[in-house]
Amino acid sequence: MAIQVINDKCRGCKLCIKACPFEAIDMVGKIAVINEKCTACKQCITACPFDAIEKTEEAAATVDLTAYKDIWVFAEQRGGKLMNVALELIGEGYRLSREISDSTKVCAVLVGDNVDNLAQECFEYGADSVYVLQNPLLKNYTTDGYTKVMSDACREYKPEIVIFGATHIGRDLAPRVAARLGTGLTADCTRLDVKVATYIDYANKNTTLDTSTLDPNDTNTQLKQTRPAFGGNLMATIICPKTRPQMSTVRPGVMQKREQVAGAKGELRTVKVAVAETDIRTKVVEIVKSTKEIVSLTDANIICSGGRGLGDGSGFDLIKKFADKVGGVVGSSRAAVDAGWIDHSHQVGQTGTTVKPNIYFACGISGAIQHLAGMQSSDIIVAINKDPDAPIFEVADYGIVGDIYKVIPQIIEEWDNAEKLYDATTK
Amino acid sequence: MALKIIVCAKQVPDTNEIKIDPIKKTLIREGVPSILNHDDSNALEEALKIKDIYPDTYITVVTMGPPQAKDMLIECMAKGADAGVLASDRALGGSDTWATSNALAAAIQKIGDFDIIFAGRQAIDGDTAQVGPQIAEKLNIPQVTYVEEFELDKNMKDITVKRALEDGYEIIKLQTPCMLTTIKELNVPRYMSISGIFDSCKKDIPTWGAKELNVDVEKEVGLDASPTNVYRSFTPAGKGKGIMIEADSEREAAQMLLINLKSKHVI
C-alpha cells in the first residue's frame, strides 16, 4: 500500500474526498480511509491541509538500470513507407537524447522486409543510428512476429527508452513487448521529459501543477511521461523507476519533426532476427486501403468541427460546405460520432485525433473536457454556440453566441471579403 | 463441444459527464454514473451473438474492481452472460496495466479452459488499450486488436476478423484460443431482458482476492509490483478567456470575426 492516512493527524474534513478523482477515499467514522480504487495519484496529499496523508517509499531498484543506454524509436512503416509519426518521434528522441548525455543516441528501429532503404530518411530526420530487423516473414505487421524480434532486440541491446507511435499498430505491439520484457508502458503520451528542469518549465507554462516540490538541479534523467487520464480531465505524469526499458506510446501529431538534412549520415546496424513461420499465429489475408475519404486532421491548417449542437446529421452538409470554402477539413466531437452523424475518422479529442491547426472552428460543440484535450493547442480557436455558458468559450480565442445555421452561412459568404473588410478598418 | 467464452469488462465512470470546477480546477464527481465501459459492451455483445447461434456456449464475464463492480456483472448477466467473476482485493489496488493483466490472467486461468476472450479495446477512464494485449501475452495466446468484424467457422476453431486501421483495414485469420479486442463498429449492444434481469439477481458472483487468484502481492499485483507509478498529477491549465464577439446581426458577427482573423494573419 502506498498512499496512507496518518490517523492521528486526520481531522475528518473530507477535503481529500473532494479532491480524489477516483472515489478512492471513504469516511470511516471521522477518519479518511483509502480504498482499492486508489491509483496513488497524490491528489489527496496536495489537498490535505493537515499533512495527514503520505506516500510510503517504493521498494529499492532491483534491476541494474545503468546497463541500459540510448533511445529507441520504433520507426513504423506500412507498405515500405515510413509513417509520419516515426519521423516525429525521431525528432523527439533526438531532443531527449541530448538532454540525457552527450553520448546518448537516438536510434530508429526498422522492422519489415527490405526496409533498409528507409534508413536514409531516418538519418535525415535526426537518427544517430538505425537498427534494421528484416525478414520476409516481417513484411506485413503481425503481433507475434514483431513482438518477438523487438523483444529479442531490446534484450540484446538494452535501450534505456523505447517509444512507439500510438497508432493501431503501435498500440497493438507495445503492450505485448512491454509485457514480454516485464517492464512498464505508458499509453498515448502527449509530452515526454527527462530533465527535471525542463519538466518544471513545461509544468509552469502549461499546467496548474505546484512545482515548488521539484528541484531544478535534480540530475535524475528518468523518463517523465505525461498523458491525459480520466477522459482528459486530469493529466498524469508517469515514471517507470524500477525496470528498463522505459516504454511509451506517443500520439501522432504531437511531437515535432526535425528539419530534414539531405545526405545526413549515421550508423547502420543490421540485427540478426530469429523468427519462424510457427512463431506467427495470425495470418494477414488482405490489407485494404480505405476508399472512404481520407481525413487528414493532423495535417490540416484549418479544421471545421461540428458537434451535438448541429441538431441532426444533415448539419454536416453545412460544415462540409464551410470546410470547402475555407480550405479546411471536417472534424467532429465524440457526441456527433456516437449519434451516428459522421464517421469516427473525423473525431477530434481524447479518443479521437489530437489536432493543432492554425484555426479550429468549433460549431455547436459544447466543449467536453475529452474534446478539449484533443484540440486546445490549436493556434486560434473560434467557437460558435447558442449556449453562452458552453465550456468551449473558456478556451476559445473568439466566441460567437448564436445559431450556427445563421452564423456559418454568413462567414462563408463574407470569407472572400476578409481582406477588404480588414483594410477598411485600418484606413 | 460447447464453446467457452470469456469477456473482460470494466466498470467506469461516465467521463462524458465529468466537469471541472472552473474556479477550484478540481473534478466535479457528484452525480457521475458508473457504467459498463462502451467497448466492453461490444465485447459482450459479440459473445452473445455467438450464443444466439450456439446456445450451449458458456459466457463468463470477468472484471477487476471494487465490490460495486458486481452491479456491472449483474447487468452483463441480465443481457445473457452465464456467469460473472469479480477480482477484488485491497492488495490489487493501485495496479497499473501490467499488474492488472496479471490479476485478470490469473482469474482467467482459474476459470479454466476457454476458446475466445473478448475484451473492449480500451476503457474510457484510462484509455490505454494495454490490458487486453498484456493478458494475451501472459496467457501466451494470439491476439487481434481493433476488431470490427468477426466470423467463426462451423468447425468452431477457425476465426476470420476484420481489423480496423487508421487508413483502412486488414483481414486476419487465426485459431482459438485467442484474444480479440473490440471496437464499437463491431456490433450494436443489446439491452437487458426482463427475464434476464430476474435471473441474474439469483446468480451467485464469486469474489476472488489475491489469495484465491494465487498471485504474489509483492511481485505481481498492486501498486508496489506495478512497474509504472504516478510521478505527478494535475489538471490542465485553461487557456485565458478570449474575445466574445457581440454584434447586432449574424452578418456583422461574421465580418468582425474575419477582421480579427485577418489581423492575426491566420487567413
Image (spheres, rainbow, N blue to C red):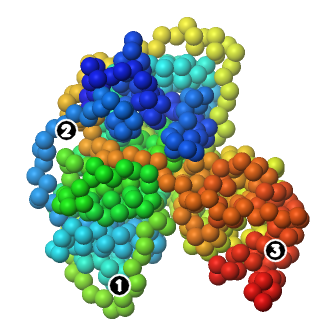
For label 1, the SS is helix
Estimate the spatial distance between the alpha carbons at disc 3 and disc 1, rounded to whole Å: 45 Å
Most extreme residue toward the top is B202
Amino acid marked by disc 3 = Gln
For label 3, the SS is helix
Q: Nearer the viewer, residue B46 or B75?
A: B75
Whether residue B138 is visible to the viewer of this picture, yes or no, is: no
- For label 2, the residue is A58
Question: Label 3: chain?
Answer: B
Looking at the rendered structure, the number of numbered marks drawn on it comes to 3
Whether residue B29 is visible to the viewer of this picture, yes or no, is: yes
Amino acid marked by disc 1 = Glu
For label 2, the SS is loop
Estimate the spatial distance between the alpha carbons at disc 2 and disc 1, rounded to whole Å: 42 Å
Foreground disc of the pair 2, 1: 2
Q: Residue at x 36, y 74 (%)?
A: A91
Check the image and report above or below for A269 versus A68: below
